[in-house]
Structures are given as C-alpha cells and as structure tokens.
Amino acid sequence: MSDKEREQKSSNVVWHHATVTRQRREKQNSHKGAVIWITGLSGAGKSTIAHAVEERLHSMGCRTFVLDGDNVRHGLCSDLGFSDEDRSENLRRIGEVCKLFLEAGVISLTAFISPFRKDRERVRSIIPHGDFVEIYARCPLEVCEQRDVKGLYKRARAGEIKQFTGIDSPYEEPVNPELILDTHLHTLDECVDQVIEMLRMRAVLAPACPTD
Ligand code: ADP
C-alpha cells in the first residue's frame, strides 16, 4: 500500500490534542525524547548496544524503551514476512511506534538491520527534525560472520536462508548518520560512552555534572 492510499484511508480521523503535552512530559522526565535508530549488519552489535545504552540511561533515571525484532515480530508485525515489501512495512510501523514514544517523552532505541536507505529516510521524514538520531553500528562483514551470534551467517552461506543482508542481499550504508560506532575497534563500554556523549551534545540529556 502506498503512503498516499494510507493517508486517504484515514482522512476522516481527527487527532485529539492531549493537554499533557510532550513538553510537559519531558519537563517531568528531566530529559528530552528521542528516536535512536541503530542500523548495521547482523552481528554488528545493534541489540547489544541498544540494551547497554538503555541500562545506562535507566540508571540515570531516564524513560527508555528498546524495540527489536522479537518484540515487534511477535505482535505488532506478526502478519509480516521477510519480502522487501514486508520488511519495509515492518520498519514503517516501527517508525510510527517510535513517533508515539517520542510524544510520550521517551528515548526509544531500535535495533534493526534496516538495510535500505529509503526505509530509514522514510522514518526520519515522519519524526520532527533533530529528534531522529541515526547510529551506524559499523563492523566489517568478516568480523560479523566470525561472531555469528545466532548462527545465521553459517545458514545463509549454506543456502538455508535466502536474501540474507551482506550475503545475497545488499546493505546500504548510511550517508550522513549522526554517529558511527566501529564495534570491532571499540569496546561496548566505549560505544555506550559515545552514545551518551552524543545525547548530551544534542541536549537530549542535560550536560554532565563534574561528579558524573
Ligand atoms: P546485532 O543486533 O547487530 O545483530 P548483536 O548485538 O546480537 O548484533 O551481537 C553483537 C556481538 O558482538 C555480541 O556478541 C557482542 O558481545 C559482540 N561485540 C563485541 N564488541 C562489541 C561492541 N563494541 N559493541 C557491541 N557488540 C560487540
């Protein structure tokens, strides 16, 4: 379904404006909402980083939520498969969920390969300017394949999984991501530090106090 058809279908729905606004929620939370979109090859470290950043933010008292393959594919997107069209729809729905979380003043973190630029750009386009933070978890294919956390590369090489990103399906690198994390060069802790530093620079989080 095209974006235009989707728009027409919902044209009779009127948005009810909440009195508890995003601004009020953010003031209560003492931080801003943001959509942290982590992209990269399978095994590059997206999930590990998303959960480690969430742990750090949670311990700082921030409102957070991680969206990853399992928690959306089991429910919200359980009707979708892995065709190009379904993958695209999967990401569109996740983007819309992130947008709602943003209104709720939450810092959401996503961990999807999201290999195609057009899908990532579509999400960026529905999120207010500056609130979408694209992080490229960059790691050479050989390293990802060596890690083979879920044994998927082995199965893809054996021809058991078709259209596997990096093997027989392309990965389009981000052109201008807000942050690049070289996960084969830095430890997980260093990567988390870089994300937190970037969130301070973007004023999602307050500047660090000397005691932090
Ligand atoms: P993805 O979600 O991108 O498929 P995972 O997070 O499931 O990747 O797996 C990444 C693997 O790489 C984990 O075993 C993790 O421990 C390891 N790893 C090594 N260094 C890093 C790093 N700097 N950041 C994230 N993961 C790392």
Image (cartoon, rainbow, N blue to C red):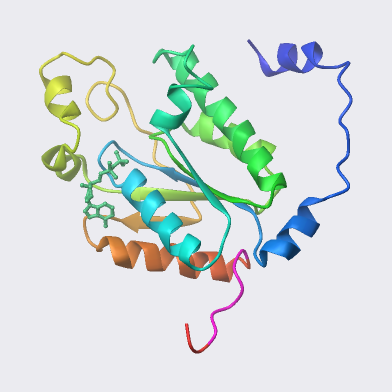
Q: Residue 195 location in percent, x, y?
A: 44, 62
Q: Position of residue 82 (x, y in %)?
A: 39, 15
**Residue 31, image x, y percentages:** 64, 64
What predominant SS class does the magenta segment belong to?
loop
118 left or right, relative to 101: left
Bounds of the magenta span? 204-209
33 versus 44 height, above or below: below
Residue placed at 22% from the left, 45% from the top? 140
Dividing the picture into quarters, in which one does residue 6 lie? top right
- Whether 60 is drawn above or below 4: the answer is below
Residue at the location (17% across, 21% down)? 156
Q: Nearer the viewer, residue 93 or 140?
A: 93
Q: Is residue 84 above or below residue 91?
A: above
Q: Residue furthest bottom?
A: 210
Residue 178 falls inside the magenta stretch: no
Left or right: 91, with 29 as reference point: left
In percent of width and height, residue 190 lies at 32, 67
**Position above or below: 34 against 27:** above
* Res. 115 in view: no
Q: Quadrant of residue 111?
A: top left
* Residue depicted at 58% across the width and 56% down the height: 63
> What residue appears at the point 47 percent right and 13 percent down from the top-left corner?
80
Quarter containing the N terminus: top right
